[in-house]
Image (spheres, grey):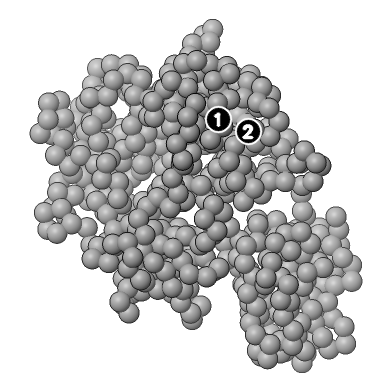
Amino acid sequence: MPSPADRTYSNSHEWHLLQGDTLTLGITRFAVDALTDVTYASMKPIGTKVSAAGTVGEVESVKTTSDIYSVCPGEIIEVNKAVADNPALLNADPYTHWLVKLKITDNTPLAKLLDAQAYDKAHPVH
Amino acid sequence: MLKTALNSYHHSQHGKMVDFAGWEMPLTYAWTNPDGSAGGGITAEHVQTRTSGGFFDVSHMGRLKVHGRQAGKLLEKLCTRRVRDMKPGVCRYALLCNAQGGIHDDIIVYRMDEDDFLVVCNASNREKVIAHINAVKDAGGFVASLEDQTSKTAMVAVQGPRVIEFISAVSQEIPGLKRYTFAVKNLLIAKLIVSRTGYTGEDGVEVILPAGMIDMAMTMIMKKAPEGLIRPCGLGARDTLRLEAGMPLYGHELTEETNALGTGLDFAIALDKEAVDDGEAFVGADALKRSRDSGGPPTKLVGLKVDGKRSARQGMKVIVGGREGGVVTSGAPSPTLGICIAMAYVPSASSTPGVQVEIDTGKGDRLGATVCALPFYKAPKVKV
């Protein structure tokens, strides 16, 4: 299934969806497949200031622990509690189940990200 | 990348293939459940093995034939455990140590016949083990020869509480095998070795067979089994299964620098075996005796039950009594126990069950954990 075309993608496998100055962040299907079963997701609390390419939290699977990055600087304004309570949601649908929302102060880093087509080409899910 | 005889099978089962010690191996598979839904994945494969049966390709492991008039004597010199008192049909877990008492590899030795042995070693250590065996053989002038049979044979493990019950339907002999014994089945010109061994903590068998016979064996195992009784499981589940079963993995719990006496594998180390008839002091024994006589190993391998949902990972420091004193060697959320578990080396004085420690995540915070005895999980006895 192709990745949604309404957002942009980093090579560290986060998706970024910008609406006004609110950036919604999640991880891609490729990331979920690479991590294998996600067992734990913990995001930094609301109000945390994040620098460009800073971490917003971490996701763990049976095999490994992986930090989650935001390409844009800003402040965490919302954390998806449903995912924290039930990380398996990410295994089922990583594009519906976002991780955090940030009020960003600079959206220029988004221009460097990949669109869905380029991302899927670079990181095919088999 | 090297490919096992089962490579096309893995692809046909939608294996998620990864490079493991130079071999293209399945980390996990994507099954289709009987109801058509997507199945597989590390946790599902783990549960499959704990509750029914899992099929693992372990052909990447090294299979080395050691034979000749002094093959037994050579292996006695190499292994931390008695070899020459084994009867044909018996296999035994042992360590190969370096001169400092560190660990080259952990292996299983099969005694095929008086002067004929098979050594099964880790994929990542095969070249090293071959070089080590040859070096000890040449230095001691042992009359023995070594043949690497890895690529011309295949090896599969079938593990789980319902495996022996299934095998009973096709064989009377195999279910009668005791743990760590094996039977050799001669099929035309081909030889099949079936041992009651495994690396999951479950009952089951491991089968070594000529690579060219693998299709026939797969038909026997997978097609004769009722739907869902046995499913393919990848290296991911193999890792979490062995972790729950408290079994060490080379590169994690065992390394060249690991003091063999701290591993908890005492059953596999006979320090004074030269004292018995046809015993032989093994490589590394002197260093280990010195360690024993000077108070024992400074650190010991223990189990840790970790507080909370975050997992400890290999390399994280263990804080004991406020001081850095140990290191995590493996860690994962345990599918069977529902908590995070880990193995770690901690100072011997703090290795008793119940001791509270902390794990430094390396990200500015710590996880609480409690030392516990290994294994974390023991299979309930099943009557067949």
Percent position (x, y) of residue B383? 47, 29
Q: B384 or B145, which is in the foreground? A: B384
Q: Which residue is rendered at x = 69% and y = 85% of the image?
A: A52
Amino acid, disc 2: Ile
Q: Residue B163: which disc?
A: 1
Q: Is residue B271 above or below residue B89?
A: below
Disc 1 vs disc 2: Cβ atoms closer than 8 Å? yes
Quarter of the image that includes the N terminus of chain B? top right
Residue B48 screen position, x and y as percent: 61, 42
Residue drawn at 79 percent across, 79 percent down: A24
Question: Quick one: B189 or B267, which is closer to the camera?
Answer: B267
Q: Is residue B72 left or right of residue B332?
A: left
Q: Is residue A71 visible to us here?
A: no
Q: Position of residue A40 (x, y in %)?
A: 62, 67
Count the numbered circles shown: 2
Residue B274, relative to residue B300: is it above or below? above
Task: Say whether residue B354 is left or right of residue B2.
Answer: left
Tell me which label, 1 or 2, sits earlier in the chain.
Answer: 1
Query: Hey, what amino acid is under mark 1?
Result: Val
Instruction: Determine which of the numbered discs, if any, sits on residue B230 in the image.
Output: 2
At label 2, counting other C-alpha atoms closer than 10 Å, the crowd grade (few under 14, some 14-19, many 20 or more) is many
Local secondary structure at mark 2 = loop
Position of B196 with respect to B326 (left or right) is: right
User: In front: B224, or B51?
Assistant: B51
The lab-note entry on whether marks 1 and 2 share a chain reads yes
Residue B31, quarter of the rendered image: top right
Spot the residue most to the front.
B383
The quarter of the picture where residue A101 lies is bottom right
